[in-house]
Image (cartoon, rainbow, N blue to C red):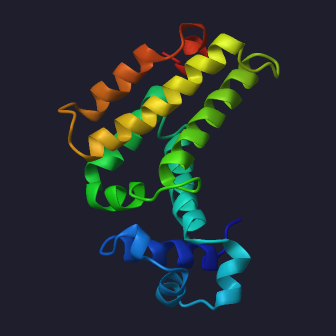
């Protein structure tokens, strides 16, 4: 169970990022907004990147709930719709750069989700070398699509974007990732 303090820190970050660019947000600002001490902050998070990524993980976990998303396509739809509904917040979060960036986190979590789904359906076996390459390209593509949706470079409905991504999934894995 996640504590009230954990949520207070994430809520403090969310209040800040609505008005301040990510690179201008400091741990001190998050602590002040959350009403926690430095030691309390560091008990839960190592830096502001981890707060941002935990925030996205919470969103991913929420939309991964079978009561909300019955398949991988639904999950993509909800995440794209969230980006469309919260462009200012997501643009600021996606502006982070480097290894701990949100974009890298989205790639890593997409890849791990695909690997977990595959292993669960193959008695622990992961990707073949060809599938690994395909999934790598697919997950990098998810990040690119997410950025372009935020920048309004695609005139596409989130449902159509989710359907198109399904069509691009590695053929050998589609039946694992999509339940009709």
Q: Position of residue 167 (x, y in %)?
A: 41, 14
Is there any visible trace of residue 71 in the rendered image? no
- Is residue 88 or residue 7 the one in the foreground? 88
Q: Residue at 48% x, 47% y: name it.
A: 103
Relative to residue 7, is residue 85 depicted above or below?
above
Q: Residue at 37% x, 27% y: name it.
A: 162
Relative to residue 82, is residue 178 depicted above or below?
above
- Residue 42: image quadrant is bottom right
Query: Relative to residue 167, is residue 134 drawn left or right?
Result: right
What residue occupies the far left of the structure in this picture?
Answer: 155
What residue occupies the far front of the structure in this picture?
Answer: 98
- Residue 118: image quadrant is top right
Q: Position of residue 35 (x, y in %)?
A: 54, 90
Is there any visible trace of residue 117 in the rendered image? yes
Q: Residue at 52% x, 19% y: name it.
A: 178
- Is residue 72 or residue 16 the one in the foreground? 16
Q: Position of residue 18 (x, y in %)?
A: 32, 71
What residue occupies the far top of the structure in this picture?
Answer: 172
Q: Residue at 66% x, 74% y: name it.
A: 3
Query: Relative to residue 165, is residue 127 drawn left or right?
Result: right
* Total number of numbered discs in the rendering: 0
Q: Position of residue 26 (x, y in %)?
A: 49, 80
Relative to residue 170, is residue 44 depicted above or below?
below
Location of the N terminus by quadrant is: bottom right
Query: Relative to residue 136, is residue 14 drawn left or right?
Result: left
């Amino acid at each position: 169970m996640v504590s009230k303090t954990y949520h207070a820190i994430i809520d403090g970050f969310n209040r800040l990022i609505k008005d301040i660019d990510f690179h201008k947000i400091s741990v001190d600002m998050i602590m002040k907004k959350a009403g926690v001490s430095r030691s309390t902050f560091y008990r839960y998070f190592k830096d502001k990147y981890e707060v941002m990524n935990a925030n996205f993980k919470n969103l991913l976990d929420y939309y991964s709930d079978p009561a909300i998303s019955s398949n991988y396509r639904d999950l993509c739809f909800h995440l794209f719709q969230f980006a469309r509904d919260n462009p200012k917040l997501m643009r600021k979060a996606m502006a982070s750069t480097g290894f701990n960036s949100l974009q890298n986190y989205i790639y890593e979590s997409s890849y791990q989700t695909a690997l977990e789904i595959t292993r669960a359906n193959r008695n622990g076996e992961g990707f073949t070398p060809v599938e690994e390459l395909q999934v790598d390209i697919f997950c990098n593509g998810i990040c690119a699509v997410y950025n372009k949706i935020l920048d309004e470079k695609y005139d596409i409905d989130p449902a159509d974007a989710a359907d198109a991504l399904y069509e691009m999934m590695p053929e050998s894995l589609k039946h694992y990732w999509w339940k009709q």
